[in-house]
């Protein structure tokens, strides 16, 4: 429209000048001259611009050849943005919609998914850009699985929700993550369960700076508690989560009183004072030592933190008549073969026993497997090893684990805790278990790299099997028995587990305290084996300070 407007103006002015000149010179001016001049002017202006764009495209350095997967509205919007930035040069669209096949979009042809290998070879493509923001998690996973054999790095634009809420733009590209492969369709939370123990209440999260603790805080603050107490042993972790929550508080005008407290859960006197001073109604106890190999080498500290620390904060909750107490447990508590799992099962027994000792505080615990991206999990370790050029190390080729995203786990913990009464043990539906070797190979392929092995000596990343570590299982379980019941939520179940009366359990606690004080590892082993934990250690119990 701009060219047409200026061509009309130019032709009009030129015609006026020619008419004036012809009248002055008394010369004949053919009527077709303005039309011919207008046509010539349009062709000249358009041609000049076309020539300039063509010259620029071929003289400037071309970007990395990429394929855009998805020729819908978002893919069409992405194309001119990529051309403008010039980092990438789109060479083809891929779309499974047969109606779009062979269609040309701004000079880029749409092909079917069957053509992708030929296109990669033809254009030497190293990256594929997923532009399917409205696709479901299962659809995205299916597409990503199909693209893995191409050995191209896969990048993706934000999902539909991120685009709608403005948290990301159409050109915000990120590498496809393990979440995209292992994540699953979200089940809508039950609003009454999310807010039941939080809205207008005073809430405390122990281990608030950890992976699960920090995500619990992020979700708790959205439910508008009166105050949120962050109890954390590590100064920097507390500083980080407190800053993040204060920003959320300001941006969303939540007006929540955020209280950061440095402290140790084993300090029962301090815990008692915290609960009293801030009139705590709900506790989410996420503080624990959870790294299996480290706890194996630091048995006594692991017991003091995971068992006696839980006992201290639970008894303080009883003293101060806290309404709800929710323990974050683990699948490693089921038939444990390591100290970490045994201590978490012992912590469960403490809450089960205390629940039957009082009528005010409602104790419950939520048991689940690994969360993607948590500190100490294999995913960030593998990412770092890949970034460093390998090798990836794993302990056994057949080892399997359950995985869940951190936000989903935290959301389910809050909802399960709202249903908990009288020492309930909740088990989260973790979906299918994942073979860690397969996870490693997928992460290598997602990075656009190949596996180095005897069949591919020139590959990029080697996978080394190092052998199971002390106390490590090949697979994890979530249930001790088969007596599980459903709840109001499709991904939360209750398990009817063995428990001890407080009088019996207290004897074991006192014996364990004495053994830890004396640093008697043989006695500690005997107590843990004799307790109803189903503890079957594969190795001798040890402690580096013994």
Image: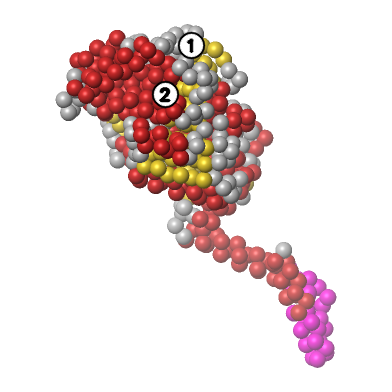
- Is 346 magenta? The answer is no
Q: Quadrant of residue 226?
A: top right
Identify the residue position indicated by label 2 in the image.
Answer: 329
Q: Residue 496 got which mark? A: 1
Scheme of image coloration? secondary structure
Q: Secondary structure at mark 1?
A: loop
Residue occupying the point 41% across, 23% down:
330
In percent of width and height, residue 474 lies at 33, 17
Q: Is residue 257 left or right of residue 17?
A: left
Q: Nearer the viewer, residue 214 or 115?
A: 214
Residue 365 percent coordinates (x, y): 46, 22
Q: In the picture, residue 506 is in which quadrant?
A: top left
Q: Which residues are magenta?
A: 14-39
- The answer to whether residue 545 is left or right of residue 107 is left
Name the side, left or right, on which 482 lies relative to 393: right
Q: Judge whether 542 appears above or below 22 on screen.
A: above
Q: Is residue 117 visible?
A: no
Residue appearing at x 49%, y 55% in the figure: 86
Query: Within the magenta stretch, is there residue 28?
Result: yes
Q: Quadrant of the C terminus?
A: top left
- Tag 2's secondary structure? loop
In the image, residue 41 above or below residue 497: below
Residue shown at the point (23%, 22%) measured from the top left: 516
Image spot of residue 272 (x, y percent):
40, 34
- Residue 291 position, x and y percent, is 32, 28
């Amino acid at each position: 429209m701009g060219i047409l407007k200026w061509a009309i103006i130019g032709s009009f002015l030129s015609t006026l000048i020619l008419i004036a000149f012809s009248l002055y010179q008394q010369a004949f001016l053919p009527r077709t001259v303005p039309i011919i001049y207008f046509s010539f002017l349009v062709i000249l202006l358009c041609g000049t611009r076309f020539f300039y764009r063509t010259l620029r495209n071929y003289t400037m350095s071309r970007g990395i050849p990429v394929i855009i997967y998805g020729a819908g509205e978002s893919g069409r919007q992405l194309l001119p943005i990529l051309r403008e930035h010039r980092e990438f040069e789109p060479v083809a669209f891929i779309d499974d919609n047969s109606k779009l096949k062979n269609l040309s979009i701004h000079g880029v042809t749409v092909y079917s998914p069957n053509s992708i290998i030929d296109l990669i070879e033809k254009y030497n493509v190293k990256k594929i850009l997923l532009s399917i923001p409205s696709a479901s998690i299962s659809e995205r996973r299916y597409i990503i699985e199909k693209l893995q054999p191409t050995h191209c790095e896969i990048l993706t634009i934000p999902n539909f929700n991120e685009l709608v809420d403005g948290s990301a733009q159409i050109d915000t590209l990120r590498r496809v993550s393990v979440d995209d492969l292992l994540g699953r369709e979200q089940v809508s939370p039950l609003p009454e369960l999310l807010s039941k123990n939080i809205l207008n209440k005073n809430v405390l999260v122990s281990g608030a700076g950890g992976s699960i603790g920090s995500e619990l805080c992020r979700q708790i603050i959205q439910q508008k508690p009166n105050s949120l107490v962050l109890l954390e042993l590590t100064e920097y972790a507390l500083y980080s989560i407190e800053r993040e929550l204060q920003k959320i508080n300001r941006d969303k005008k939540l007006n929540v009183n955020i209280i950061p407290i440095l402290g140790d859960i084993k300090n029962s006197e301090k815990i008692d004072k915290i609960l009293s001073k801030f009139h705590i109604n709900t506790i989410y106890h996420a503080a624990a030592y959870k790294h299996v190999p480290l706890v194996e080498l630091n048995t006594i500290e692991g017991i003091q933190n995971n068992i006696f620390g839980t006992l201290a904060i639970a008894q303080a909750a009883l003293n101060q008549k806290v309404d709800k107490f929710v323990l974050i447990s683990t699948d490693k508590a089921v038939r444990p073969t390591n100290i970490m799992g045994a201590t978490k099962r012992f912590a469960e027994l403490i809450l089960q026993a205390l629940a039957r000792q009082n009528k005010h505080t409602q104790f419950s615990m939520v048991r689940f497997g690994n969360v993607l991206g948590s500190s100490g999990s294999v995913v960030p370790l593998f990412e770092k090893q890949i970034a460093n050029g390998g090798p990836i190390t794993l302990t056994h080729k057949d080892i399997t684990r359950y995985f869940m995203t951190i936000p989903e786990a935290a959301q389910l913990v809050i909802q399960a805790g709202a249903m908990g009464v009288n020492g309930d043990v909740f088990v989260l539906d973790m979906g299918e278990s994942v073979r860690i070797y397969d996870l490693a190979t997928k992460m290598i392929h997602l990075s656009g790299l190949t596996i180095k092995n005897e069949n591919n000596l020139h590959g990029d990343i080697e996978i080394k099997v190092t052998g199971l570590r002390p106390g490590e299982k090949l697979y994890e379980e979530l249930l001790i028995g088969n007596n599980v019941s459903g709840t109001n939520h499709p991904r939360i179940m209750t398990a009817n587990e063995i428990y001890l009366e407080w009088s019996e359990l207290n004897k074991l606690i006192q014996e364990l305290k004495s053994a830890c004080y004396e640093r008697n590892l043989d006695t500690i082993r005997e107590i843990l084996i004799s307790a109803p934990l189903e503890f079957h250690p594969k190795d001798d119990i040890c402690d580096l300070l013994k």
